[in-house]
Amino acid sequence: MDHLQPLLLVLLLTIISTSTHAINNHPSCNTNDQDSTLSVFHVSSPCSPFRPKTHLSWAETVLQMQADDQTRLSYLSSLVAGRSFVPIGSGRQIVQSPTYIVKAKIGTPAQTFLMALDTSADMAMLPCSGCVGCGSSAFAFAKSTTFASLNCGAAQCKQVQNSECLGKTCLMNMTYGASSIAANLAQDNLTLATDSVVGYSFGCISKAVGGTLPPQGVLGLGRGPLSLLSQSKSLYKSTFSYCLPSFKSPNFSGTLRLGPNGQPKNIKYTPLLTNPRRPSLYYVKLVGIKVGPKLVNIPSSAFALNPNNGAGTIIDSGTVFTRLVTPAYTAVRDEFRRRMGKNVVSSLGGFDTCYKVPITKQVPTMTLMFEGAELSMKQENFLIYSSAGGITCLAMSESPSLNVIANMQQQNHRILFDLPNSRIGISAERCS
């Protein structure tokens, strides 16, 4: 289903079971979800049941995240009121780069999951009991008194592309990254923090083939008719924001704020654009990039919105490292290298600008300039370091057609999505 293919911004849900019991006993893992704010944490933090079972070296971790990003980039490129504070946590090593997760509750009685937060996904998908190819945690829908399958005559079924009927059941066939998914369209109550959305429609996954589907499902924050924004419009007025903590943060220090109330007042906005080729994505007008005080010479065509091929610039929560089209990336990289002087450049996986000597004192600032707003980045937003201090890389790479402002570059910033006013707000905010 192309509406599910439309990019899934990743908030990961996982059933809290034995694996999470020990995690919940860790004092820093206790969340303080309130009103419409949820905690967010990184997938590989101590609070996450998805953290790697075996220790990975820094290089192995970076290469895995970079490889997952490449899969997601290919996936993105192929796709032609109320208030609630939800804690966000960080993660890594999950296929399709679902690096930020939130707790969500489904059904009656509620079953708790950690769902991948994905701004490029248009609906929620959840592994259900009996799913072939899914992980061990699944939604036991038979135990929920409020669960219902939706039939082919339901209005929601008509909003799903690639749907078909088996008897009266609305079936969906879709892709997520490199995974093929079969699901039934269903509905049940969804609770985030203290707010509930009654009769929330989602894909109840019955079969998954491929390794890129987040094991505990996806909560889509895109702009499609079955996304969280659309289904909770009367409650949250199509408005939300998040602050993503560092992927090194050990607890639920980030927040997802749902609804117009409680959003920051002093924040700069840039217009939210729509590309008819990919209407669910959050396009913005990138007008320039500074390395240090210098505005890098980049042709305006590198940033241009193109309705024919979907080119332009999007803000995405599921990609880890920012990707820039070749003319923009080459110009930024070359200016960065120039400022590093005569230090010898090496490569690591998909990163072509790495150094084996300490460079922190020479590193310039970097600023992404949008129409009306700026995202000023500290070193932590665009450099990755070896834990032993042996190598440092510029955490960006090139893209064939789409500029993607990724979550590492967004860390410790409040990104506000205000759909009624067609704008996106950006301000610095420490949440690690």
Image (spheres, helix red, strand yellow):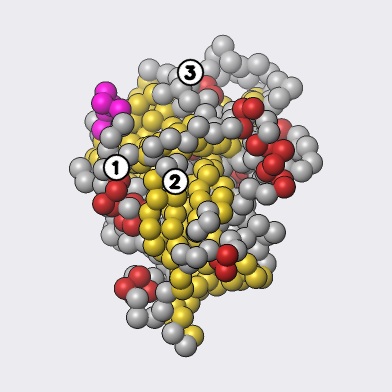
Residue closer to the observer: 352 or 280: 280
Report which quarter residue 427 is drawn in.
top left
Could you say which disc has been placed on residue 82 in the image? 1
Q: Amino acid at mark 2?
A: Leu
Above or below, 414 against 148 in this view is: above
Q: Earlier in the sequence, mark 2 or mark 3?
A: 2
Report which quarter residue 284 is drawn in.
top left
Q: Is residue 353 magenta?
A: no
Q: Amino acid at mark 1?
A: Gly
Residue closer to the observer: 82 or 214: 82
The answer to whether any part of residue 291 appears in the image is: no
* Distance of label 3 from label 1 (alpha carbons): 41 Å
Can you identify the residue that label 3 sits on?
364
Quadrant where the image shows the N terminus: bottom left
SS at mark 1? loop
Eye-nearest disc, 3 or 1:
1
Residue plotted at (39% across, 37% down): 35
Residue closer to the observer: 268 or 200: 200
Q: Is residue 266 magenta?
A: yes
Q: Earlier in the sequence, mark 3 or mark 1?
A: 1
Residue plotted at (72% across, 46% down): 19
Q: Amino acid at mark 3?
A: Pro
Q: Earlier in the sequence, mark 1 or mark 2?
A: 1
Residues at marks 2 and 3 touching, judged by CB atoms closer than 8 Å: no
Q: Position of residue 223 (x, y in %)?
A: 33, 54
Above or below, 151 against 94 in this view is: below
SS at mark 3? loop
Could you say which disc has been placed on residue 192 in the image? 2
